[in-house]
Image (cartoon, grey):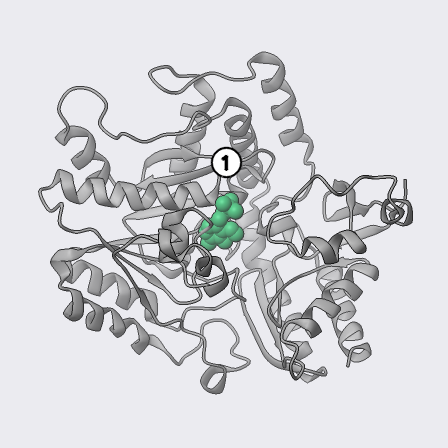
Amino acid sequence: MNQREANSGSLDLSAFWMPFTANRQFKSAPRLLSGAKGMYYTSYDGRRILDGTAGLWCVNAGHCRDEIVAAVREQAEEMDFAPTFQMGHPKAFEAATKIAKHTPGDLKHIFFTNSGSEAVDTALKIALAYHRSRGEGQRTRFIGRERGYHGVGFGGISVGGIAPNRKAYSGGLLPSVDHLPHTLNIAEAAFSKGQPAWGAHLADELERLVTLHDASTIAAVIVEPVAGSTGVLIPPQGYLQRLREICDKHGILLIFDEVITGWGRLGAPFAAQYFNVTPDLLTMAKGTNNAAAPLGAVAASHAIHDTIVNGAPAGIELFHGYTYSGHPIATAAACATIDLYEREQLFERAARMSPVFETAIHKLRSEPHVIDVRNLGLVGGVELKPRDGAPGARAYEVFVKCFEKGVLTRYTGDILAFSPPLIVDEQQIDEIFTTVAQVLRETD
Ligand SMILES: Cc1ncc(COP(=O)(O)O)c(C=O)c1O
């Protein structure tokens, strides 16, 4: 069946209520993918599509890698499922050990979830449990950030800073949450290469919130080191260091949501190592097992783990977990993925390709509609001037035309986002941005 046949109805599109999708628009002109290998997807109508986004910021080692496919197949044959409540199986322990080899500082205790959203809500719950264990149970407030994305659980949307994700559910948001301002300022920092020089002072807003609420009520601050989903917001130089200092000063936990920045995206295992700022809790998902099966995790420091576990009376220490926490197939895929990252030195490769990526994406500066280009590691954003009265329409059109020309991009509002698999080469980087440039010239 080709794209046209799918469009004409021989594939029934009606039952699947698609997530974060304009369902009516999509189903009137679907874009279907049917295969993937390495840097490429195959579209339903048989075209090769260069993956400029690692799927959804997740297929960091490239698609359908033989070693990961084999690990998934073998695990599915050997043991499909085993509980991790009061039972165990080796792959979950092996995967946690392999993950802990790469997590920063002493964040060596790994709690498995099935997604980034669950990892975020788990981290928030661990923060509350930690303060309660140490006798400061009144620390219940969380500080998130405007334009932050932390998934779709009630915790995640509460600390997140995206109005449409919150508005319909406003009655159910966590009661004690405040937000830092986001760090994007095009007037001050447009076309910055890497971290903008302007904006570290925005971290001082945390002091203002501490004064307002009192430190004794605040459990944790959660931020994405680089905000991905709202259009690639790169932290200003010194900003994350300053957040760390203020948290330390007031006994507030710092949580890095590394669902996107984890596993090599910046050319280091995690953004924490890249920025040399170690949080107390770190969330991951996506690249942890190259998205071969649903998996997320929280890495916790010794202090947090030991306070909760050693401080509890005999019995279960943390009343939290998912049926699929440490699922055999997902963790088998994580073991194979991490082995692959190490063997092919993909994080080092990402670091080496970053300057090539930077040069290529910044060439778009002179193209029509472009009002900002920003980048770090192998992640980049290109912000377009919105069409009068139709915000988002221009970027959507560019996204569709790029797909038609064989390049997968992402868009949010009027921002195009790029995050290719870490195996991307120079020609492919060139092809991604040459295609975007051509499309921008053809777009009014
Ligand atoms: C920073 C961040 N946190 C959390 C999530 C949610 O992850 P998931 O979609 O796996 O629930 C995402 C997803 O893109 C993310 O980028």
Snapshot quadrant of residue 312: top left
Quadrant for the N terminus, please: top right
Where residue 375 appears, as percent x and y from the top left, is 55, 69
The residue shown at (33%, 16%) is 86
Q: Nearer the viewer, residue 324 or 197?
A: 324
The residue shown at (69%, 60%) is 409
Inspect this view and state whether residue 219 appears: yes
Q: How many marks?
A: 1
Amino acid bearing label 1: Leu
Q: Is residue 221 left or right of residue 131?
A: right
The residue shown at (63%, 81%) is 385
Where residue 199 appears, as percent x and y from the top left, is 37, 78
Q: Nearer the viewer, residue 410 or 350?
A: 410
Inspect this view and state whether residue 262 appears: no
Where residue 271 appears, as percent x and y from the top left, is 42, 55
Snapshot quadrant of residue 333: top right
Q: Which residue is mark 1?
A: 295
Query: For numbered disc 1, what is the local secondary structure?
Result: loop
Q: Is residue 295 above or below residue 425?
A: above
Q: Is residue 203 left or right of residue 9?
A: left
Where residue 344 appears, as percent x and y from the top left, is 60, 42
Snapshot quadrant of residue 401: bottom right
Residue at the outermost top position:
78
Q: Nearer the viewer, residue 273 or 395?
A: 395
- Mark 1: give few (<14), some (14-19) or many (20+) Cα within 10 Å: many
Q: Is residue 68 left or right of residue 97?
A: right
